[in-house]
Image (cartoon, rainbow, N blue to C red):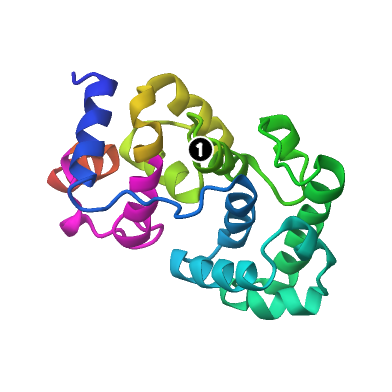
Amino acid sequence: MVKISERIKEIVETLGKYYTLRTFEDSDPFRVLIRTILSQRTRDENTDAASASLFARYPTAKLIAEAPVENLEVLIKKAGFYHVKAKRVKEVSRIIHEDYGDVVPEDMKELLSLPGVGRKTANCVLVYGFHKDAIPVDVHVHRISNRIGLADTKTPEETEEVLMKTVPRRYWLPLNDLMVQFGQTICRPIGPKHDECPIAELCDFYNHMNEEFDE
């Protein structure tokens, strides 16, 4: 049986041939935090457009906190759910400005205390804003990890815990980044494109499905 570390290495290297690892042009922790909040339940291109519009008009936590929520809604509309997200980024900005002196906390517990910030968002801030090792687990990473057999869990939090124990640290960031792109294009929630999947042979779901078909 192939060791889990060797399997993960093959998965990362194979997906790396199909997708480019993304980088945040601006790794300022505050902008990473706000951008990640805006990214919830929307596509990267929408997040990029909304973030660019927002920071062009209001570049600091203080300015966002003081901005009328209606103005924020207009600027981030492309990110979707803009009524909720506008209130959220305004409140988070207020807390960062007033309670933390415009310095985003570098601590998981404190990040999780911010409104609308879950472990995935907090981990993104730690990874992209502070360059710390972490595994941001969103719906794609959770689904794919269970589908291909890297985890057998019910929640993203449980998946994160499993992956941190089994995935070699050097693969933490690329595994997340590649899985997100893979989940958006091929390993979709409904109608995964098995015929186009570059890691089908490494996938428990695919192999089990073929076994049942052969029977």
Residue 136, image x and y in percent?
51, 40
Residue 173, visible in the rendered structure: yes
Residue 121, image x and y in percent?
60, 46
Location of residue 114 (image quadrant): top right
Quadrant position of the C terminus in the picture: top left
Amino acid on which the number 1 mark rests in the picture: Val
Q: Residue at x 16, y 40 (%)?
A: 201
Residue that extends furthest to the left in the rendered view of this protein: 214
Who is closer to the viewer here, 171 or 200? 171
Who is closer to the viewer here, 204 or 40? 40
Q: Which residues are magenta?
A: 176-201
**Label 1, residues with CA under 10 Å away: few <14, some 14-19, many ≥20:** many
Above or below — where is 195 with respect to 45?
Answer: above
Quadrant position of the N terminus in the picture: top left
Location of residue 202 (image quadrant): top left
Q: Residue at x 19, y 21 (%)?
A: 2
Circle 1 is placed at which residue position?
Answer: 127
Residue that extends furthest to the right in the rendered view of this protein: 98
Could you tell whether 113 is left or right of 23 in the image? right
Who is closer to the viewer here, 114 or 54? 54
Whether the magenta-drawn stretch holds residue 87 is answered as no
Residue 206, image x and y in percent?
24, 45
Q: Secondary structure at mark 1?
A: helix
Could you tell whether 187 is left or right of 113 in the image? left
Whether the magenta-drawn stretch holds residue 196 is answered as yes
Above or below — where is 158 with respect to 185?
Answer: above
